[in-house]
Amino acid sequence: MTRNPELVSINCTSCGAGLDVLGGGRVVVQICPYCGSELDAQDNYRTLRQFTGLKRPETPFSLGQKGTLYGVEFTIIGLMERQERWAGRLYSWVDHQLFSPTHGYAWLTVDNQHLVFTRRYRGSAWMSEQWVETADYPPTVTTEYGRFKYYETATSSITYVEGEFTWRPKVGEKTTTISAMSEDAMLDFSTTGSEREIYRSVYVPKEQAEAAFGVDLNLKPYRVHPLQPFAKGPNYGFLRNAAFVFAAICLMMAFVLTTRTGYPVMRDFNVDFRNLPVEIPIPLQADSQLTRISFLGDVRNSWAYLDLELRDPTGEPVFEAGRMIEYYTGRDADGTWGEGSQRASLTFRPEQTGNYTLVMDVPEQGVWNDRMADRVPSRPFSNLRVDVTSGLSSGLWALALAGAFGLLFLFQFGRKHLHQRARWSGTDWVDEE
């Protein structure tokens, strides 16, 4: 016996409560939300059994609500809570059975404050527990929707039922589900007793569901759902690609600017320690280019402090500075070693054209007094070579700009990478080494 297709409401044959008839002809049972009685929709709604003491789960949806998802108007006809215990924790979610007179049945699930839309998949693909347990790598299946990679195996049980269903759910009934995921969907290979079904699920943004059902959903997810798409933003691709291109351009600019050799203004100007202090004239052009004054001292296991002052063509001080040159070397069980440098330099930008004057003195110097000095001779400072090069440029700012663009690229690229990691963080596949 089948129910009358003209029915729009009934009275519960157990408690007499008025119940709406919402589903289509494939509905086989209706469970009264007031007394928990399971009514046979195919046999004048006679009471089959009664579910008592069940706690109704929280859900923002109710039976009879209508909403349009993916161009199809659905009505919520049933509500079912499932739970899974894994790694000592209890996970629960609420499935809402949907019905459309033109497109049949589907599910809308509230899972950890996220929404998922599910429909039965009629393809022939299948992933078994034995395949998962014996595979060396995560199993994959390919369908017309793309390639799906193994995600997890879960065993859940029904803890609450209410409304109309196309099969007879039993509280406590267990279902083992093997899930495989693609970039934007999930296939669930479910086994309940001897029944096998395949479902395909996609993520439903909260804003889409609110617009579909005309309600304000107070859902506040705090973790990334496995099916949640990456929120690129309107300029994601442009920012990522532009940042990469500009970072490369700035790196090339920094390389070119840094490797410019400039032109010599003074070469191999030797200063004897005995003639210090000295004044060295340096003819320079105010060409907006950098000038570098380089020093090379003949220290060995010794040091010298250079006291420097530069005056412009009018005799005004440009700067006063100090530079230390020191170099130490020796031999030990590991061989010969050395540290420090016999070189020093300073860089500035001339603002006037003319003869600058470098005033130089060495007020302090010394020799390294160590027992190693007996094995490696020391040489006190006695001579200094001065070189001046102008027409130089610095790639520091271009390098800094390249770093900024590089960070922007890494931020955009990393956002997607971290999102993908978060999507797959719940997989139970463990690579064995």
Image (cartoon, rainbow, N blue to C red):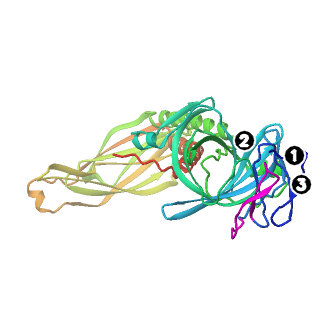
Instruction: Report how far apart the C-alphas of labels 3 and 1 lie in the structure.
Output: 11 Å
Element class at badge 1: loop
Q: Is residue 55 magenta?
A: yes
Residue identified by numbered label 3? 9
Q: Residues within 10 Å of mark 2 (few under 14, many from 20)?
A: few
Dot 2 or dot 1: first in sequence order is 1
Q: Nearer the viewer, residue 161 or 309?
A: 161
Q: Residues within 10 Å of mark 1 (few under 14, many from 20)?
A: few
Measuring from the top left, give residue 424's x and y in whole percent.
Answer: 53, 48
Q: Is residue 305 visible?
A: yes
Instruction: Answer left or right for 374 relative to 338.
Output: left
Which residue is painted at 61% across and 57% down in the image?
A: 223
Given the current orientation, which residue lies at the most extreme bottom position? 53
Residue 90's image quarter? bottom right
Region of the chain picked out in magenta, as a range: 36-56
Residue identified by numbered label 2? 234
Residue 5's image quarter? top right
Is 254 situated above or below 226?
Answer: above
Q: Nearer the viewer, residue 27 or 354?
A: 27
Which residue is painted at 76% across and 61% down in the image?
A: 218
Dot 3 or dot 1: first in sequence order is 1
Q: Residues within 10 Å of mark 3 (few under 14, many from 20)?
A: few
Q: Nearer the viewer, residue 281 or 238?
A: 238
Q: Is residue 399 visible?
A: no
Given the current orientation, which residue lies at the most extreme left position? 375
Front tag of 2 and 3: 3
Tell me the kind of residue under disc 2: Pro
The numbered dot on residue 4 is: 1
Measuring from the top left, give residue 186's x and y in whole percent.
Answer: 61, 42
Dot 2 or dot 3: first in sequence order is 3
Tell me the kind of residue under disc 1: Asn
Instruction: Answer left or right for 169 relative to 263.
Output: right
